[in-house]
Structure formats: structure tokens, C-alpha cells
């Protein structure tokens, strides 16, 4: 039997109109948007479908992305397609939790709304994030240590693509050290905070209080934690891992490698864009991957899952 992993992208893949064709076509998708809107206290459908500058503001981006992904997921489920494991990059981990039935959808949407607000407000100075391309992982980690201040690897996306995050001066020093070592591409990212660095620890602690009020269900379909790059099977660890995730490195490459090692035969990216599919090609060219972003993708994805 085919072993399927559902993958959910994170912040940065959003665009106006995402999931609208699912919403227009399927009542189950509209129900997801209604649930999210009630839980978040705002009209998520309008946020996703209309030209709205808020869509690129962290406190709104996060609820919009997870809702769009959850709507697409529900349409795929209506076709009888289920996963053996779920994983999401950064924010996408919340859709992975939802996909596994570990938290109720309304609790996931409420927590994500709060997470976006806490992360937006966590570090008013702004900090910085820079993508480092074409460098060895060990070199990037070494330059972060030598730079001083608060700077760390925020994302291990795929071979040759990492992201560093932290205090702006420290990130700039690390980038300068990397260039001295022959790394040609260090690209500053347009972000509103130093995500997945120690500067966001306060936001994680705020989130802990929110998650403490949510019901965590026994885990039947596991997900891979960004923090550990390992399966989460114990419901008692979910909240703590989600808290740590805000200020910890996202070990995406390691997560995918673990799933490949354990025999996943098809990876299905569910959500806006094809970022994760691109990472997959860099991690393992032989891995089978497909993407559900538009209603027009549904027939092919279902066919591949059933083959």
C-alpha cells in the first residue's frame, strides 16, 4: 500500500485568491472558512480572496494560510485520501496538527490567530532574516557562532538553502563572514520579525497560555515536529513542541529525510505555491511529489494517491 505524507507550506507562499476555487466549488471548503472566521473573529474569506495589504502582515497571514490549506485538505479528504504522516514547514505545522485530528479545527484556528499576533508584536526592533544560498551547513552554523550577538540558523530548508535569523547587526555580521568564506549569495528577506530565533521566545511563552486551554486528542496519525525532525506520537508533548517551535530552528530537510528513510512513497504538498515541492527536488530527486494548489490539480493528485 502506498504510504502518503501530506506537506503544508509556511508563511511567504500566500497570495490574494488562494483557495477561492475550492471555496466556490465545494461546500466543505466553505465550512472550513466559516469555522476559521468564527474562531479568529474576522472574515478570513475576505482576507484571502480580496486584494488586502493585511495578507502580508504576519498577524493576518498566518490565519489566512492555515485556513486556505485546511480547506484544500478537506476537499482532498472528501475523495477518501488519507495520509500516513503529516508535516508542515513552520506555520504549516499547525495544519499538520489539524490534519491528524490532534486538535479541533476551531482550536487550531484560534491558536494560529494568536500566534500571528504574538509573533508580530514580539520584537518591535524588527530584527532580520537572511537566506544563505550555496553554502555548506557547517560553515553557516560556524559563522553564526563567530558573529556574536543573537543569530542562528532559522530554517534548514534543503541542501544549499538555509535562513539565518536574529538581531540585525548580528545577522549582517554573519552574512559578512560567510561572504569572506566565498559564499556569494546572502539575500536579506522582507519579514516583520526575526522568526525562529531566541528573540521570539517571549511569543512562544504567550502561546503556551493559549495552548493550555486547547484540548489535545490522542494521536492516531503522527506529524513530524520542526523542532526535533522526529515523529510526534505522544499527545502530552504537542503543546510544548509548538511553543518551542516559535524560537527554534525549522529542521525541514531533516524531517523530509526521516520520512523518506521510513518508506514514504508519495509526498503531497497542500497549499499555496510549490515551495515545498521545490525543496523536495533538492533533498531527493527520486522522491515522488505532487501539489494540490488549485481545484484543477485535484483529479491528478487523487489518481496518484490511489495508484
Image: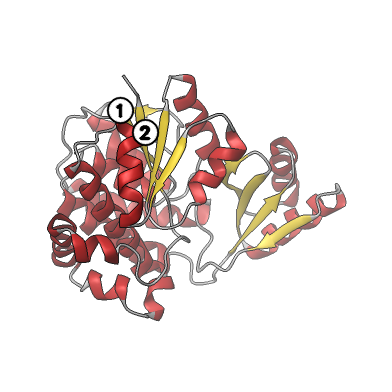
At label 1, counting other C-alpha atoms closer than 10 Å, the crowd grade (few under 14, some 14-19, many 20 or more) is some
Image position of 67 (left or right of 304): left
Dot label at residue 5: 2
Residue occupying image coordinates x 16% and y 49%: 213
Nearest the eye: 57 or 26? 26
Q: Quadrant of residue 38?
A: bottom left
Image position of 82 (left or right of 3): left
Nearest the eye: 29 or 218? 29
Q: Secondary structure at mark 2?
A: strand
Nearest the eye: 68 or 241? 68
Dot label at residue 165: none
Quarter holding the C terminus is top left
Mark 1 and mark 2 residues within 8 Å of each other at the beta carbon: yes
Residue occupying image coordinates x 18% and y 67%: 37
Residue designated by label 1: 84
Q: Secondary structure at mark 1?
A: loop
Q: Position of residue 284 (x, y in %)?
A: 58, 31
Q: Position of residue 67 (x, y in %)?
A: 27, 59
Q: Quadrant of residue 54?
A: bottom left
Q: Relative to 164, does residue 55 appear above or below in the rendering?
A: below
Q: Quadrant of residue 185?
A: bottom right
At label 2, counting other C-alpha atoms closer than 10 Å, the crowd grade (few under 14, some 14-19, many 20 or more) is many
Q: Position of residue 28 (x, y in %)?
A: 14, 55
Quarter holding the N terminus is top left
Residue occupying image coordinates x 36% and y 45%: 93
Considering only order in the chain, which callout, 2 or 1, is on the residue closer to the N terminus? 2
Label 1 to label 2: alpha-carbon separation: 6 Å
Q: Position of residue 42 (x, y in %)?
A: 20, 73
Amino acid at each position: 500500500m502506498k504510504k502518503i505524507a501530506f506537506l503544508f507550506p509556511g508563511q511567504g507562499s500566500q497570495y490574494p485568491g488562494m483557495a477561492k476555487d475550492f471555496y466556490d466549488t465545494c461546500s466543505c471548503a466553505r465550512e472550513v472558512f466559516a469555522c476559521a472566521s468564527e474562531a479568529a473573529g474576522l472574515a478570513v474569506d475576505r482576507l484571502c480572496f480580496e486584494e488586502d495589504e493585511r495578507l502580508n502582515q504576519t498577524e493576518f497571514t498566518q490565519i489566512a494560510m492555515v485556513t486556505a490549506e485546511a480547506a484544500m485538505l478537506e476537499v482532498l479528504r472528501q475523495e477518501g485520501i488519507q495520509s500516513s504522516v503529516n508535516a508542515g514547514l513552520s506555520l504549516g505545522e499547525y495544519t499538520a496538527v489539524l490534519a491528524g485530528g490532534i486538535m479541533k479545527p476551531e482550536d487550531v484556528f484560534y491558536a494560529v490567530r494568536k500566534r500571528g499576533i504574538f509573533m508580530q508584536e514580539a520584537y518591535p526592533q524588527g530584527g532580520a532574516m537572511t537566506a544563505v544560498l550555496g553554502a555548506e551547513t557547517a560553515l553557516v552554523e560556524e559563522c553564526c557562532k563567530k558573529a556574536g550577538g543573537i543569530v542562528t540558523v532559522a530554517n534548514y530548508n534543503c541542501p544549499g538553502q538555509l535562513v539565518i535569523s536574529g538581531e540585525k547587526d548580528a545577522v549582517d555580521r554573519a552574512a559578512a563572514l560567510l561572504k569572506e568564506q566565498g559564499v556569494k549569495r546572502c539575500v536579506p528577506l522582507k519579514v516583520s520579525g526575526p522568526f525562529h530565533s531566541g528573540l521570539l521566545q517571549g511569543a512562544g511563552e504567550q502561546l503556551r497560555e493559549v495552548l493550555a486551554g486547547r484540548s489535545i486528542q490522542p494521536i492516531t496519525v503522527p506529524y513530524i515536529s520542526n523542532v526535533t525532525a522526529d515523529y510526534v506520537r505522544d499527545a502530552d508533548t504537542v503543546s510544548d513542541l509548538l511553543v518551542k517551535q516559535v524560537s527554534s530552528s525549522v529542521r525541514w530537510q531533516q524531517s523530509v529525510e526521516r520520512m523518506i528513510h521510513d518508506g514514504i512513497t508519495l509526498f503531497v504538498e497542500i497549499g499555496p505555491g510549490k515551495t515545498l515541492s521545490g525543496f523536495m527536488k533538492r533533498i531527493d530527486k527520486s522522491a515522488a511529489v505532487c501539489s494540490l494548489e488549485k481545484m484543477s490539480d485535484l483529479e491528478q493528485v487523487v489518481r496518484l494517491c490511489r495508484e
